[in-house]
């Protein structure tokens, strides 16, 4: 569970270095995408080990980068993380009702 103190620590880290001036939504979105690609890279050529058990440390590090950029993007845009995530889950609950989506990987437009 992401705690408020963790969010504040990520923001403080940025602010203590006077980096907010560089954190435009565009640049944060770019950085977020790059970090997500680095997370994906961990799984490249993983063969049958789809969980990459020997790369858990790298997965943790890259996931932390992705989450940090998400926190910073929400901060710059003035979004409350709990609010936007809960709003999205509510929309997804409507698009993917349990009785139609259970065990089904189809997109909501293809659920019958």
Image (cartoon, grey):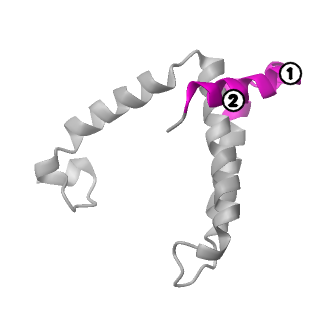
Q: Give whichever of 60, 26 is nearer the camera.
A: 60
Which residue lies at the image location 57% right of the left edge and 25% below the top edge? 4
Q: Secondary structure at mark 1?
A: helix
In the displayed structure, 22 sits above or below 32; it is: above
Tell me if I can see residue 111 in this picture: no
Q: Which residue is mark 2?
A: 26
Q: Give whichever of 32, 11 is nearer the camera.
A: 11
Q: Which residue is mark 1?
A: 16
- Where is residue 93? Give x, y as percent: 24, 38
In the displayed structure, 12 sits above or below 68; it is: above
Tell me if I can see residue 44 in this picture: yes
Q: Which-is-in-front pick, marks 1 and 2? A: 1
Which residue lies at the image location 62% right of the left edge and 61% below the top edge? 40
In the displayed structure, 17 sits above or below 110; it is: above
- Where is residue 43? Give x, y as percent: 61, 70
Which residue lies at the image location 10% right of the left edge and 50% below the top edge? 99
In the displayed structure, 12 sits above or below 1; it is: above
Q: Which residues are magenta?
A: 3-29
């Amino acid at each position: 569970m992401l705690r408020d103190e963790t969010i504040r620590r990520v923001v403080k880290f940025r602010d203590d270095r006077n980096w907010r001036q560089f954190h435009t939504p565009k640049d944060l979105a770019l950085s977020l995408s790059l970090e997500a690609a680095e997370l994906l890279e961990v799984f490249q050529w993983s063969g049958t080990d789809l969980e990459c058990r020997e790369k858990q440390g790298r997965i943790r590090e890259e996931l932390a980068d992705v989450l940090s950029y998400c926190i910073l993007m929400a901060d710059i845009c003035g979004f409350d993380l709990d609010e936007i995530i809960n709003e999205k889950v509510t929309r997804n609950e409507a698009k993917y009702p349990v009785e139609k989506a259970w065990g089904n990987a189809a997109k909501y437009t293809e659920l019958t």
